[in-house]
Image: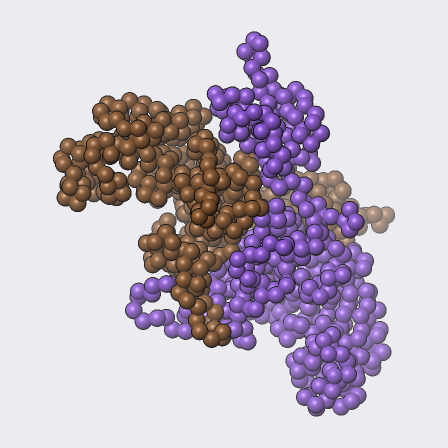
Chain colours: A brown, B purple
Amino acid sequence: MARKTSLSGFPEWLPEERLVELHVLDVLRETFELHGFSSIETRAVETVGQLLRKGEIDKEVYVVSRLQEDEGAPEKDDARLALHFDLTVPFARYVVENGGHLAFPFRRYQIQKVWRGERPQEGRAREFTQADVDIVGDGTLPFRYDVELALVMIDALSRLPVPPFVLRVNNRKLAEGFYQGIGLHDTAGVLRSIDKLEKIGPERVAAALQEELGASPEQARAALQLASIRTEDTSFVEQVRALGVNTRLLEEGLAELAEVVGEAARRAPGTVVADLSIARGLDYYTGTVYETVLVGHEQLGSICSGGRYESLASTGKKTYPGVGLSIGVTRLVSRILSQGMAAPSRKVPTAVLVSLADEDSWSEAQDVAAQLRGRGIACEVSANAAKFGKQIRYAERRGIPFVWFTARGEDGVPVHEVKDIRSGEQVGADPASWTPPAEDLRPVVRAVTAGA
Amino acid sequence: MARKTSLSGFPEWLPEERLVELHVLDVLRETFELHGFSSIETRAVETVGQLLRKGEIDKEVYVVSRLQEDEGAPEKDDARLALHFDLTVPFARYVVENGGHLAFPFRRYQIQKVWRGERPQEGRAREFTQADVDIVGDGTLPFRYDVELALVMIDALSRLPVPPFVLRVNNRKLAEGFYQGIGLHDTAGVLRSIDKLEKIGPERVAAALQEELGASPEQARAALQLASIRTEDTSFVEQVRALGVNTRLLEEGLAELAEVVGEAARRAPGTVVADLSIARGLDYYTGTVYETVLVGHEQLGSICSGGRYESLASTGKKTYPGVGLSIGVTRLVSRILSQGMAAPSRKVPTAVLVSLADEDSWSEAQDVAAQLRGRGIACEVSANAAKFGKQIRYAERRGIPFVWFTARGEDGVPVHEVKDIRSGEQVGADPASWTPPAEDLRPVVRAVTAGA
């Protein structure tokens, strides 16, 4: 990662780095499909009007226009096109447009690039890949899907070559119900203050709650007490109850959060925390909210976030509630690469270089290669009948593990041998049946354990 | 394909259509890797200066700018960013920037979206996916790779659910050498006229050659004679020689084209044609040039084109010659879908719906699902313990072939059964070992034969 890209904020990988990214993408796709999610893609552009509906993000948007607009007056502002900055806004439009063709609850995954005109810094690029899964209902969506999404997330992250992670879960109903119970009604305002907890500390948050929202010292203290609760099991319920607040909304939030945390903790102890300080996104989400950090890499920020929303989109007649999560693939891959957390077993897909004994044997060598490919063995054929030593060095330089030799036997019948150039071992081989050991069939990306 | 997308020129697929596209993408990736090509991706944007280097395409470019440019003066024109309109320009930049980290000849595939501000029409979108493979040398690149690329193309297209295709090959050296031999030195001009052959016919091309390029009637006739040659084997060589022209460049071109066509015809008879009327791209390429049409869909245009270039990029000190091809994935997939050439065996990845006998069994049902997923079987768990009939209808509506039932036996031990809802057959099953028939494991995309 010492290598600098030519345009800041637009990361590009070398082929061996791309293998790590491909591995991450393959694992995510495989996991999402195992959980019954269908792939979709949406176009890269939306209208500016569509993108700005959520407000507040106009600074980040890249608008798109033809270099030579030749159709008279330029488009009206809202009709102009811009690159999408997430996959949620396009998905909402897709669901509304195609609602009649989809089976609800609709389970979709979507892995695409998104663009934001932000100032680039570590963990924040201008072009990056997101991997989203959402389950969206037509009118209603059972709460159980909130629990399921946590399990999908844990399953997906567990299969990746990354350090242990912690899934932090909170619930908007719980927070809002509690604040109402202590007489603070500006939920969004309280959440904005609580969100600064890690950055500015509890005293300054308490001061802000009092100065900006008119909270009493007791109200501020209670809000901070709630935000300090953090448990790896459902014991947060008792801790919240001990604060003596009681509203119906709080109870609903407690029950929901307990169900998510209880089920996740039962399946994957130690990976989930009920963290009542999580405020981020609560403003947008309406119930469960998730975020995820890698242990030891907390400052990287959340690598996987999401939550429940009561209305992904609505068309007047219909609303589409949903629950979803989004994995920051580029953020994750950048960290895997910069920290050497994982590496491919070789740099190229090729398992076998089919060498040439003489210039006339190229076509025959292609026959050998075709036979090997027929059994899923990736190969290349030498372009020249250079000395064997040179052909072997070509394979070495690229990280190709095997070199295939074909000689003309005394009776004119070809004699095949294959050499493992790592061990030097060379054996007779039949192009119709030889296969490399399973671990050499294709490049494998493995986690690199510390100290290894 | 009656369904209209909301933005003309930006196709979006329904989940079952996306399965067809994913299948095409998977086949291409698999084929390219079997032939030893490494995956890379480049950023979606290049500088306008980089994109316009080739000239003539400025009308098609989408420039990108932040909605709220807040950094003082706008960028100079050439430094502005624009979406790439192909994968060749970005690849050239990538090779120059990363030359020191790549092993040459560098074999890469690249499958990404590209954007062109063209007027949308069938077979021509504003956002579409291209799949490119190139082999690039450092300084030199043996001619044999031109033959190899034709074999890669044939292998890739043969694996796709499309009608028979014909690979049309020509050679710039052959054309240029011939024109020189008959005294026509404006090769590019002649090629531009020949390119109109199919559209305006031989008489008007002959007139254009005489009026615009000052050719004599004999020269025009000879050029048209060359362009009329079309053979499925290497017999074009004799036909060209019979025209009585002889230059060293022509001989070189004949030998090269004969090698490509001879080898391709030997391996896949009937899929390759030496077509000496192919002019397209000859202006840009320096030797072999390929294009490909689907038989019966010639008016769709080429679905896979490419050729040899003497200099993909150069940095003053270095030049990088290469040979490559590009498959128009979106054009191909649009046609497959609009003509119903292929269809997935089901609409969703899910093979099994794990049903609920009662509301308390959800967590247990997740255990069953986790066991099945552990063996690569995609499943979903019902969100509610609705009546079994309703749960079965849910599976039917989505196209899920199997429904899993777990009952509590008299001794408290769970009893598992699985029902194939297509046949109605229901059998006892163990979540630790049951697997569906191989063809039901995941959705399979198959070619739909005419009349089936």
Left or right position of B447 against B81? right
From this viewpoint, is residue B187 visible? no
The location of residue A375, given as percent across then percent down, is: 71, 42
Q: Quadrant of residue A324?
A: top left
Q: Residue at the location (18% across, 41% down)? A: A209
Q: Residue at the location (84% across, 50% down)? A: A412
Foreground residue among B229 and B115: B115
Left or right position of A112 against B169? left
Left or right position of A248 against A31? left
Q: Is residue B175 above or below residue B436?
A: below
Q: Is residue A49 above or below residue B253?
A: above
From this viewpoint, is residue A149 visible? yes
Foreground residue among B442 and A433: B442
Q: Residue at the location (66% across, 44% down)? A: B344
The location of residue A212, given as percent across then percent down, is: 17, 45
Residue ranking furthest to the front? A317
Residue ranking furthest to the top? B411
The location of residue A16, given as percent across then percent down, is: 52, 50
Foreground residue among B31 and B356: B356
Q: Is residue B242 above or below residue B362?
A: below
Exactly how many numbered labels are in the figure? 0
Q: Quadrant of residue B338?
A: bottom right
The C terminus of chain A lies in which quarter of the figure?
top left
The location of residue B105, given as percent across then percent down, is: 60, 59
Q: Residue at the location (43% across, 71% down)? A: A74
Left or right position of B202 against B433? right
